[in-house]
Each structure stands twice: as C-alpha cells, then as structure tokens.
Image (tube, helix red, strand yellow):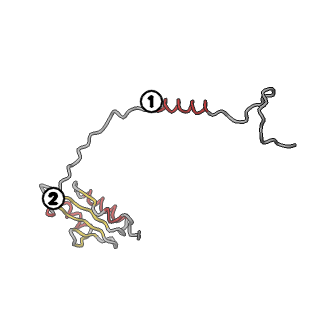
Amino acid sequence: MAITLTRVHNPMNPQPMGQMNVTPFIDVLLVLLIMLIMTIPIATHTTDVDLPASCSGCTSNADRNTVTIDEADRLFWNGAPVTREALKAQVGNAARLPEEPLLEFKPAALASYDASAKTIALIKDAGATRFAFIGDAEHRSFGQEE
C-alpha cells in the first residue's frame, strides 16, 4: 500500500478536499466579537475625587513629625527613641493641636512587617488623621541587592 503525496486533478473523478475551510469559522468569531463589544456597557457612573494640588513647600518642617522603625524594630519620634506608650501619647498630643501636623511614617527596609502594622494601628488609635508614608523609593529591593 503506497501513499501518494501528490494529487493529480482529475475532473472526472473528484476527490473530497482534505482541508477544512476555516473562513466561515472566522466570520462567526468576528460577528461574536462585534456583538460582545457592542453589549459591553459604557462606564457612565464615575466618582469625583478631590485631589490635592501639588505645592512645594506648603508644609514646613515645623508642621511635620516623623515616626521611624529601625531594623531592630525600635521606634523613633523625630529621631528620638520612644516606647509604644510614649509614641501613642505623642501622636495623641499632636492630633489634638488646632492644626494637626503631618505624621510621616518611615520604616526601615528590614523592619518587620508585624512591627510596622502594629505601629500604624497605634497611630490610627491615637487619633492621627494626617498620615503619610515616606521613603518608598528607597525600599524597592527590601534590603536585597539589585
């Protein structure tokens, strides 16, 4: 039994084509794609958000307090070491001022996540409303060499 790889066109003895015609299949897929695109709802409801305008120098250093955590999970308030209770008292006192200063939080790259999360919860419980993370660009590698 030999398999013939070439086909001679014989109009007297037509053979069925061994290939599938995919053109109707592609047409059906395109119609379904167009129907899908037309039925996707347009986003008509939006939420307006007031974003603050960038202002360099709007807040002076006197209007800022910094909470840092080092690699050994020690807490610092404006560079001075503090306990958790003292930090809560400091943040509470700052939150009660007529114009609350910005509280900047800067954990070290190798500080534990647990200590950072507990400190953020402590700051929230103390009543701080103006809070910012700083030093994000320094922690892209989280202590790993790039």
Left or right of residue 20: residue 135: left
Q: Position of residue 72 (x, y in %)?
A: 34, 73
In the image, taking residue 65 as reference, residue 31 lies left or right, namely right
Which residue shows up at 30% across the image and 68% down it?
69
**Secondary structure category for the residue under label 1:** helix
Q: How far is the residue under mark 2 from the one under mark 1? A: 49 Å
The residue positioned 32% from the left and 66% from the top of the image is: 138
| Amino acid type of the residue that numbered disc 1 sits on in the rendered structure | Met
Q: Nearer the viewer, residue 104 or 53?
A: 53
| Three-letter code, disc 2 | Gly
Side (left or right) of 80 relative to 43: left
Provide residue 82's location: percent of width, then percent of height: 24, 71
Q: Position of residue 117 (x, y in %)?
A: 34, 61
Task: Please give the label number shown on residue 38.
Answer: 1
Q: Quadrant of residue 27?
A: top right
- The residue located at (82%, 42%) in the rendering is 3
- Viewer-side label of 2, 1: 1
Q: Secondary structure at mark 2?
A: loop
Residue 57, numbered label: 2
Q: Earlier in the sequence, mark 2 or mark 1?
A: 1
Q: Is residue 94 above or below residue 31?
A: below
Task: Tell me where residue 128 appears, x and y as whole percent.
Answer: 22, 56
Residue 105 sits in quarter: bottom left
Q: Residues within 10 Å of mark 2 (few under 14, many from 20)?
A: few
